[in-house]
């Protein structure tokens, strides 16, 4: 079973993401912010990271940059799921090494489609 | 040569105090709204989980058109149930803007009391609100 690290400081968002992904057959590891995600990423085999942008301690762009520095996550797909929709932020996401930029709210069917497209 | 100065207006102290009271009242109301949203969302998510669990038990028997329809509706609700995250971000941002206004107003108009420690002024957020959505339609997807 493929594992997805779902990172969001909102408990309701984590619940919606988890409901959607487990229903599609993925194993979900939840993290409450970027720092928590970094710690969990070390202890689990992760096939894809789905992260929020605006979070305390470490945001989504910071998390992406830190994960890309690690050989284990050089090619792991990282999707940023956020309310931020400006081109400037999307460019920053791309520069940080993100695989894609998804604007909230997400549609469950479309989220699964995108994940299945990018996950290895 | 005339020296250029920033135009300024003087306000009666009572007016400034009233404005500050109104700003603080709006901030308190926003906090209350945030609490109401948290409570309602917690309950909604609990009902959502119960419905999903019950659906799972029924599906073990046989998939009917009705069950498929309920499951589809539940999946569609996932998009709308994300309102809590967006509303909370908007409330927090608006609260910071109001607080910045209240502190700036005090800083510009009130003389500090003798021996009073200088108050740290939290600047009004220079970033625009992180939430620009006007509706709960699913957002865009960009793959790089």
Image (tube, rainbow, N blue to C red):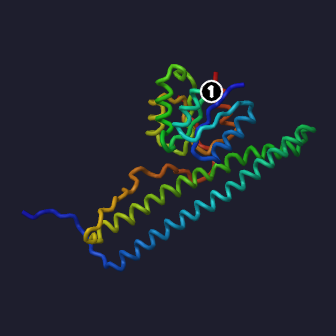
Q: Residue at x 68, y 59 (%)?
A: B40
Query: Which x, y percent locates residue A30?
Result: 63, 37
Secondary element type, mark 1: loop
- The quadrant of the rendering that contains the N terminus of chain B is bottom left
State the residue position of label 1.
A44
**Image quadrant in which you'd find residue B75:** top right
Instruction: Residue lying at the far front in this picture: please name it.
Output: B115
Against B58, residue A70 (above or below) is: above
- Would residue B140 be seen by someone viewing this image from the given angle? no
In this rendered view, identify the residue nearer to me: A119 or B14.
Answer: B14
Instruction: Residue lying at the far left in this picture: please name it.
Output: B1
Q: Residues within 10 Å of mark 1 (few under 14, many from 20)?
A: few
**Image quadrant in which you'd find residue B115:** bottom left
In this rendered view, identify the residue nearer to me: A33 or B91.
Answer: A33
**Image quadrant in which you'd find residue A79:** top right
Query: Which x, y percent locates residue B127?
Result: 41, 50
Which chain letter matches label 1? A
Task: Using residue B128 as the reference point, say whether residue A2 is left or right of it.
Answer: right
Q: Residue at x 50, y 31 (%)?
A: A64
Query: Which x, y percent locates residue B11?
Result: 30, 76
In this rendered view, identify the residue nearer to me: A99 or A36.
Answer: A36
Instruction: Residue lying at the far right in this picture: please name it.
Output: B61
Q: Residue at x 18, y 64 (%)?
A: B5
Against A65, residue B17 (above or below) is: below
In this rendered view, identify the residue nearer to me: A36 or B93.
Answer: A36
Query: Which x, y percent locates residue A94?
Result: 48, 31
Against B55, residue B34 (above or below) is: below
Task: Using residue B9 as the reference point, say whether residue B58 is left or right of it.
Answer: right
């Amino acid at each position: 079973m493929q594992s997805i690290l779902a990172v969001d400081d909102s408990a309701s968002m984590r619940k919606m993401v988890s409901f959607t992904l487990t229903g599609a057959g993925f194993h979900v590891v939840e993290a409450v912010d970027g720092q928590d995600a970094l710690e969990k990423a070390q202890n689990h085999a992760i096939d894809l990271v789905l992260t929020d942008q605006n979070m305390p301690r470490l945001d989504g762009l910071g998390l992406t940059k830190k994960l890309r520095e690690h050989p284990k996550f050089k090619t792991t797909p990282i999707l940023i799921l956020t309310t931020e929709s400006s081109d400037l932020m999307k460019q920053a996401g791309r520069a940080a090494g993100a695989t894609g930029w998804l604007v909230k709210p997400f549609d469950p069917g479309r989220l699964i489609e995108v994940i299945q497209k990018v996950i290895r | 040569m005339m020296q250029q100065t920033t135009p300024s207006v003087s306000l009666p102290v009572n007016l400034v105090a009233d404005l500050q009271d109104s700003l603080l009242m709006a901030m308190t109301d926003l906090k209350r709204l945030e609490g109401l949203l948290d409570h309602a969302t917690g309950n909604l998510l609990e009902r959502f989980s119960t419905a999903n669990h019950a659906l799972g038990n029924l599906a073990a028997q046989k998939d009917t058109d009705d069950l498929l329809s309920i499951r589809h509706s539940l999946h569609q609700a996932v998009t709308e149930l994300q309102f809590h995250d967006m509303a909370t971000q908007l409330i927090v941002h608006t609260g910071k803007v109001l607080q910045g206004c209240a502190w700036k107003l005090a800083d510009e108009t009130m003389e500090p009391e003798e021996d009073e420690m200088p108050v740290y002024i939290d600047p009004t957020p220079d970033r625009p609100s992180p939430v620009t959505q006007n509706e709960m339609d699913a957002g865009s997807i960009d793959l790089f």
